[in-house]
Image (cartoon, grey):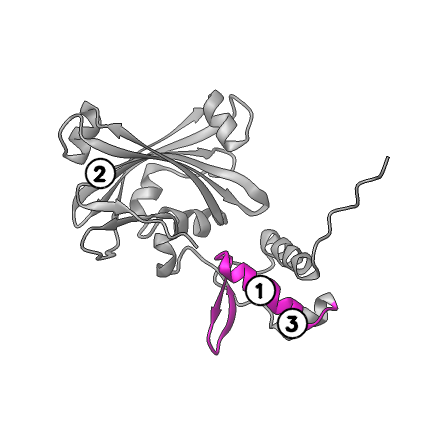
């Protein structure tokens, strides 16, 4: 019986893996410049072309950001351009004005069966649940219920959320050292119940988008599970397919 040969990994993918390890270990922090292609080529004993190919792929995945004449930087949620990477709701008029995040609740709980499965933690482990409202032009558009591992987000309170001036992901990155690098979403249509209709100021029974997201950090580790209800009366969900 023939043996299966080991999976071949191109050299640039191996270099990409090494750079990812450095990012995960915190050697280069979000917003910081990484060494030049020449320095990385010397460090890993490969050609600059191999390093460049690895960096090109990481830039395409929004892990790194090239800045003309300045170098290559670790992507950061504090960059205003990163805001709409995960938030795909766009106003009908195309104006990408920054939404206002209004924290409503924040409390500690124990992970139930679904939360433990989504977050990859044991049932009964501590979690933090956040409810917040997103407003566009002062109009409520999104209600989010967000589940976070309690061990990672120790110290997250409603007061911390209310005092933060920026996106939630920039808070997670700045305060807790956690960078979200990819997300998986499931979308379906639902009808607004009484409580949701009052919060979003729509009629009960109005069609809404239910968007369930699991967000991952380095090492493909799930660190956020959120369930959002989106009003699309004046907005649409935009997804670019390449």
Specify whether 101 is left or right of 35.
Answer: left
- Residue 161 position, x and y percent, is 33, 43
- Residue at numbered disc 3: 49
- Residue at numbered disc 2: 231
Residue 111 can be seen, yes or no: no
Mark positioned earlier in the residue sequence (2 or 1):
1
- Dividing the picture into quadrants, the one containing residue 134 is top left
Is label 3 in a helix, a strand or a loop? helix
The image shows residue 234, relative to residue 36, as above or below, that is above
Which residue occupies 51% across, 38% down?
222
User: Which region shows up in magenta?
Assistant: 45-73
Which residue occupies 46% across, 30% down?
127
Residue 135 can be seen, yes or no: yes
Mark positioned earlier in the residue sequence (2 or 3):
3
- Residue at numbered disc 1: 55
Is label 1 in a helix, a strand or a loop? helix
Which residue occupies 65% across, 75% down?
38
Tag 3–tag 1 contact (CB < 8 Å): no
- Residue 50 position, x and y percent, is 66, 67
Residue 158 or 100: which is nearer the viewer?
Answer: 100
Specify whether 52 is left or right of 143.
Answer: right
Is label 2 in a helix, a strand or a loop? loop
- Residue 71 position, x and y percent, is 52, 73
């Amino acid at each position: 019986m023939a043996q299966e040969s080991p999976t071949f990994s191109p050299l640039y993918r191996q270099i990409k893996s090494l750079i990812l390890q450095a990012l995960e270990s915190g050697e280069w922090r979000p917003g910081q410049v990484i060494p030049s292609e020449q320095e990385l080529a010397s460090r890993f004993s490969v050609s600059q072309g191999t390093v460049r190919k690895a960096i090109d792929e990481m830039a395409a995945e929004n892990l790194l950001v090239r800045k003309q004449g300045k170098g290559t930087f670790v992507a950061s949620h504090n960059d205003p351009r990163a805001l709409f990477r995960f938030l795909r709701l766009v106003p009908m008029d195309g104006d990408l004005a920054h939404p206002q995040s209004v924290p409503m609740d924040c409390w500690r709980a124990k992970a139930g069966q679904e939360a433990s499965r989504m977050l990859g933690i044991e049932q009964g482990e501590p979690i933090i649940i956040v409810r917040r409202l997103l407003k566009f032009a002062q109009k409520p558009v999104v209600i989010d219920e967000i589940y976070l591992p309690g061990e990672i987000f120790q110290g997250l309170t409603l007061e911390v959320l209310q005092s933060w001036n920026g996106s939630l992901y920039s808070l997670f990155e700045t305060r807790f050292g956690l960078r979200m690098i990819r997300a998986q979403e499931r979308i379906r249509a639902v009808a607004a119940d009484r409580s949701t209709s009052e919060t979003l100021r729509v009629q009960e029974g109005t069609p809404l988008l239910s968007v369930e997201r699991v967000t991952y950090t380095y090492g493909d580790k799930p660190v956020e599970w959120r369930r959002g209800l989106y009003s699309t009366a004046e907005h649409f969900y935009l997804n670019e397919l390449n």
